[in-house]
Image (tube, grey):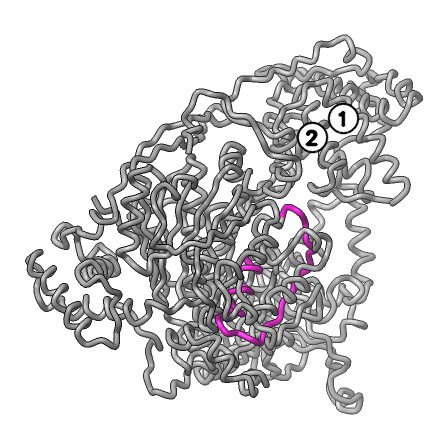
Amino acid sequence: MTGNSNSNGGDNSNQNERFSHLIETLGLNLFQKIQKAKILVVGAGGIGCELLKNLILSGFINIEIIDLDTIDLSNLNRQFLFRKHHIGMSKSKIAREAVLKYNPSANIVAHHGDIKSQEFGPQYFKQFDLVMNALDNLSARRHVNRVCLSADVPLVESGTAGYLGQLTVIKKGDTECFECVPTEAPKQFAVCTIRSNPSAPIHCIVWAKMLFGRLFGVADDSNAVTDMDDNIVEGTEEQNNIVRDLQLAVEKDKGYGQWVYHKVFYTDIDRLARMKEMWKEKKPPQPRLLADIDQELDNNTAEHINTAQLKDQKVWGFKENVRVFLETLAQLKQRFEKDGALSWDKDDDMALNFVVSASNIRSHIFGITTKSKFDVKSMAGNIIPAIATTNAVIGGLIVMNAINIIDGRLKDCKSIFLIEQPSNKRMLLVSEIPKPNTACYVCQKNFITIKLNTNTVKVGQLIHDILKKHLAFSLPMLTVGNDLLYESGDEDLSKEEIRARDALEQKVLSSYRMGDNVILAVEDYLQDFKVSILINHVESFGTEEENKKKEHEKWFEIVGTATAAAPFQTQPIQSITTTATAYNAVTDIDDLEIIEPTPTTPTPTTTTTTTTTTTSGKKRKEIESAPGSEDSDGSKKQKYETIE
Amino acid sequence: MTNDSLGAKEPVNQLTDYEAALYDRGIRLWGVDAQNRLRQAKVLFIGINSLMSEIIKNTVLAGIDSITLIDNHIVTIQDLSCHLFLTHDSIGKKRADESVQSITELNPLVKVHVVDKEIESIDKEFLQAYTIVCLNAFDLNLVSKFDTFCREINIPLIATHSFGLYGFFFSDLSDFEYIKKTEKKEKDQEEPVIEYVNHKVSFPSFETAMNIQWSKTNPRRTSPLLYALTVLYQFEQSTKSIPSIENPSHLSKILEIIDGKLSASQMPSSEQEKYLHITNLLIKHQNHEIAPTCAVLGGIVGAEIIKIISKNNHVLNNIFFYDNTKGTGVVETMN
């Protein structure tokens, strides 16, 4: 698993001379462990570049890198392995080439791909002694966290934002996992705030991005930002008091730009302004006719500021916004007609200009402060400014924790925060890594593998036969990453949505994103219960003859972890309704075993529990005998000299 | 160096559109004024070892005007260690010369100069041309000498060195002023209120810092590395030489210095062992540079140089110690 030809190759003496400082500092024994270790780096961006450089220069030679991204100009302020002529190329591949220069004999494999794709499942992860995350988004980090738990491989998790950085180590059973503490959900705004009642620039920016999606994106019924042909501004059909904006049809005849402008900045605003009860406490929005704009003064109130400004930091006046809006609208329309649906991207200048101008016009109308292109880009693109120095510090600390893990000293690993200015003299705040949160649905025993044939089993079977009957979910909701795949219950859904769901239930799993190695998050609001389920594809269970003898044909198997394969015969379970609640309440494996299986048939819960116990027991032993703990000099503790 | 941040003159943006795009993330963090100041900064690096290569990488990426390298050392295979700019082909050639090409590739907008000069021959007139001086602090007598020069001409000095798993940097900005922007968000306001606050910080000289009485410190709350550094300083001052772990007379001299400091501070002589151990660790590893230590310390020093040039953020006063065995990084302020 950890063998490598390079470590014992003929150039060993040369290698050792090259790394003489490292060997003097860490000792030859630890250096050899480093050379044997096989590691995975997920992400070759800001932290990734620093980390890869540090790993190679610390003597690591067996490294795989995965990154989906390509190189952009704004990366070059920190992603120092990349050059201007690399823009547009694969980050993982260029990073590999760049660090090979530091050690040409290193064995580095670069994947230009998505960590969430099926090829990088738990089986792939198991070949590594250690995984290191250098990711910039929550959903990929949660994914890697889960796969590492499933494969039982230690993970060093890290992140930076501006001057701030942090890192920690995640080891199944020993430490908190990435999801033990719920992460703050990205800020969401109420629909009415965005559609009808904005009060801050961000509300108008979110609205402008939705308008972009409505006009140029993939058709999406949930995007109800505006209905282009609806000219009703007041009243209802029942009351027979409808007022219409007849000008909308006139503007539509003039051209696309006039039509869109009039609809979103006149008709829709007029309708809102007529809702008198909404504007008791504040000024109603003012609909703006395009024809009136030429007569207005461009009151660009350039306030006096005592700092230098970039071109993009100047706030546009109203007329400038309208001009840019009409211009980008026409250009985007052309692109849409030529290339099809567009997705909004902060680095697409045309798309950015659209959102800047549209949000600012809306802000004007609602009496909200307008923003510069520079600021809108930050807000609309959720830019967290990343700099080289913070990444350098975190990249160095990751390697120190990695070396501790390789040396079998997990207990010496620490959670570390880098802060902007010292707190009580400390720039680096060091703390013990917390123990797992016993209520964590991801890293605690609530982790289940379901083996079945993903090409024949239908979504409906998974929902009703497995999740509801066998795992006692009442209203399972299925998500993968941030995407909602399936929602139970009828109360909150429209007739159309229920019909769509019925159709969905007839699909086979692999055709609806539930193929091999996919990790489903299954949630039940009713029971306040969540569990992660790894789908494992198997062609069949046993021979037909074997199956015929049994009362029911076996078509799936539930096991406690991805690795253990305790056979489980599916049969009707009577006592299942009680188990889910018990499962949820317990905090200890021993408690779970108290649940009595019915005399004739084992309950899936019991099976799951037993499997988990044996598996985790076995795994822990493996860890103890993993490379690193066999200290040839007999010392149990730290390999290198320390102070105090 | 002109004190442009505090002048009444209204700042003007000098960044090109390309620079604005390249340095976009930095500008979003530290602002256009800071970026303009970085753009004018000329940084002098003396002693281009692995740690220094990390610092150079970090400052060059941030977008300074130019760097000047001084180092006539001939590259050996050990020097490759975790150096970012040297390759096997560099062996046998001058370290500063061999670093130029890689640095230029890192950011072609930054000018890279090499001055072929012996470090001992540098005088304060020479230093005058730079915004900040960054010195490899292997030789503490040299740090003392440069610090005296820099204080006289009011040029910021950073001196830094790593010892295997440990490292430090010393900062002397004499009397330093900066303006920090703070955003206060009032309850009923959507937009935060922006305030600019003037700060003045006074830094002690290297000599003052190194001659600190141990009795003026609290050993339980102070990095053990500080004590070791003051021992090394006294050794180098009194013997005019660098201590060697293989020289028994050096080690007895070290012991004598520790005993002297302990008794002068009326600290128990039983503490001798502890401080001897730390000091010997530093002496033993004084030439050992490893990647994780250089990355962390180089990152902290890089950030510090950027803040000092930017003059719009808190600066560390005045010695930072990093311990890679624990991941701790503390700032000790000597006065």
Residue at the image position 33 percent from the left and 35 percent from the top: B176
Q: Which chain does the numbered disc 1 sit on? A: A
Pointer 1 local density, CA inside 10 Å: few below 14, some 14–19, many at least 20: some
**Residue B325 visible:** no
Q: Which residues are magenta?
A: A47-74
Residue at the image position 29 percent from the left and 38 percent from the top: B152
Q: Report the residue that reaches farthest toward the right.
A: A253
Q: Are labels 1 and 2 assigned to the same chain?
A: yes
Q: Which chain does the numbered disc 2 sit on? A: A
Q: Amino acid at mark 1?
A: Val
Q: Secondary structure at mark 1?
A: helix
Q: Nearer the viewer, residue A317 or A535?
A: A317
* Location of residue A514 (image quadrant): bottom right
Q: Amino acid at mark 2?
A: Val
Relative image position of residue B191 (x, y in whole percent): 52, 26
**Residue A292 visible:** yes
Q: Which mark is residue A434?
A: none
Q: Are marks 1 and 2 in contact (CB under 8 Å)?
A: yes
Per the image, the residue denoted by label 1 is A324
Sequence-first disc among 1 and 2: 1
Residue B170 placement, left or right of A561: left
Per the image, the residue denoted by label 2 is A356
Residue B95 placement, left or right of A199: left
- Relative to A254, say whether A7 is above or below: below
Residue at the image position 55 percent from the left and 17 percent from the top: A303
Quarter that holds the C terminus of chain A: bottom left
- Relative to B70, say whether A254 is above or below: above
Q: Secondary structure at mark 2?
A: helix
- Relative to A552, say whether A524 is above or below: above
Relative image position of residue B306 (x, y in whole percent): 45, 43
The alpha-carbon separation of the residues under discs 1 and 2 comes to: 9 Å
